[in-house]
Image (cartoon, helix red, strand yellow):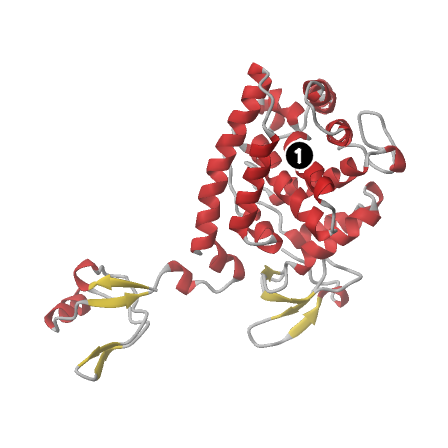
Amino acid sequence: MKTVAVLELKPGMVLGEDVIFQNNTIYTADTTLDENIILKLKRYSIMCVSIKENIDFATTHYERLIYSDRFRDFEVLYQKTLQDFYKIMQDFINNKIPPSTDILFSMYNQLYDKAQGGANLLDYLFHMVPTEEEMTYSHALSSALLAGTIADWVSMNKEAKEIMILSGYFYDIGKFVLPSELLWKIGKLSEAEQLSLKNHTRVGYQLIQPLEIDQHIKNTVLMHHERIDGTGYPFALKDKQIDVYAKYMSIIDAYIGMASSRTYRSAISPLKISDYFEKNMNLYDAELLLPVMRKIADAQIGTTVVLNDDSMWDVFLINSTTLSRPMLKNSNNEIINLAERNDLSLK
């Protein structure tokens, strides 16, 4: 709620608190103002009243989030940081100016501190909506943020965490030199376009060779599309042939890709992303993936979901064996277990 001078009131505003005059309630909270009510408030010589803001009308977790001052502050900082990151990478690609790792770590720390924790960060990233021109760089920035968060979740030491963060910033650098019409083309790519897109791992690896950064980071640029069953590219490597940081980045890349809005679809919710990972476990290192999935699933407790029957529920408890199908509770305190309801699914 906010306090508004009576002279600034407009029809349609809603009172947040009762209006008291000479110990009598003349208008109750939740009254919608019209011109007559505003005129009467002026006649009573009332100076100011409490008015509801958007966040006061929010009923779901995500509504409360996007109307919060904390999210707005994060969004402003994220957009500024995204522009700074773009300039740093353009200076490297076009002018061969090596990116300052100190600046990159500072960008990470400022955004992470603004989010105030990994669970909030997942929510905030889900609601970032970059323009088509920003998407490739936004994807990398968000990946660096999630990489550092995962490093904390799995208790990596400082050196390993820094490798994770820098891997997030650099792993898709080969895409920074590809045309956006190829990167974000709607519809099926031609065979030549597919080959050009897949070549971004080799192009990126060549770009970062002059940089004095850990070899794991360079390996991640080259290997982040490898899959442990040997179906990835560019070398069809299997399991232990793949750098462990590239294994992490393949998980992060898939998550950020699905959790980000695109011109042709909305962002996919974290629980639906968990469903994807559960169905494609053969592509990723389960020893690395499962702890990450559990953290992401636990962060969804208290959020609101809509099911395929259009009913609305809050996530109440995560099932340890089927993370994407939690126990849910509605406003009537009814509880259902999605793991036992094959007729219901997340919409």
Direction bottom: furthest residue: 23
Residue at mark 1: 166
User: In the drawing, does residue 112 fall left or right of residue 35?
Assistant: right
x, y (%) of residue 345?
68, 59
x, y (%) of residue 129?
51, 41
Q: Nearer the viewer, residue 269 or 214?
A: 214
Q: Is residue 78 above or below residue 187?
A: below
Direction top: furthest residue: 95
How many marks overall? Answer: 1
User: In the drawing, does residue 50 fall left or right of residue 174?
Assistant: left
User: In the drawing, does residue 293 fall left or right of residue 48?
Assistant: right
Residue type, mark 1 in image: Leu
Look at the image and tell me in which quarter the C terminus lies.
bottom right
Q: Residue at x 59, y 16 (%)?
A: 96
Asked where in the image residue 211 lies, by quadrant, the reply is: top right
Look at the image and tell me in which quarter the N terminus lies.
bottom left
Direction left: furthest residue: 43
Q: Residue at x 73, y 22 (%)?
A: 205
Q: Nearer the viewer, residue 171 or 330?
A: 171
Q: Is residue 180 above or below residue 314?
A: above
x, y (%) of residue 92?
58, 20
The crowding category of the residue bearing disc 1, from other C-alpha atoms within 10 Å (few below 14, some 14 to 19, many at least 20), is many
User: In the drawing, does residue 35 fall left or right of residue 236?
Assistant: left
Asked where in the image residue 309 lies, by quadrant, the reply is: bottom right
- Identify the element where label 1 is drawn: helix
Asked whether residue 253 appears in the rendered view, the answer is: no
Asked whether residue 237 appears in the rendered view, the answer is: yes
Q: Residue at x 68, y 25 (%)?
A: 189
x, y (%) of residue 111?
54, 44
Q: Residue at x 59, y 60 (%)?
A: 306
Q: Nearer the viewer, residue 179 or 191?
A: 179
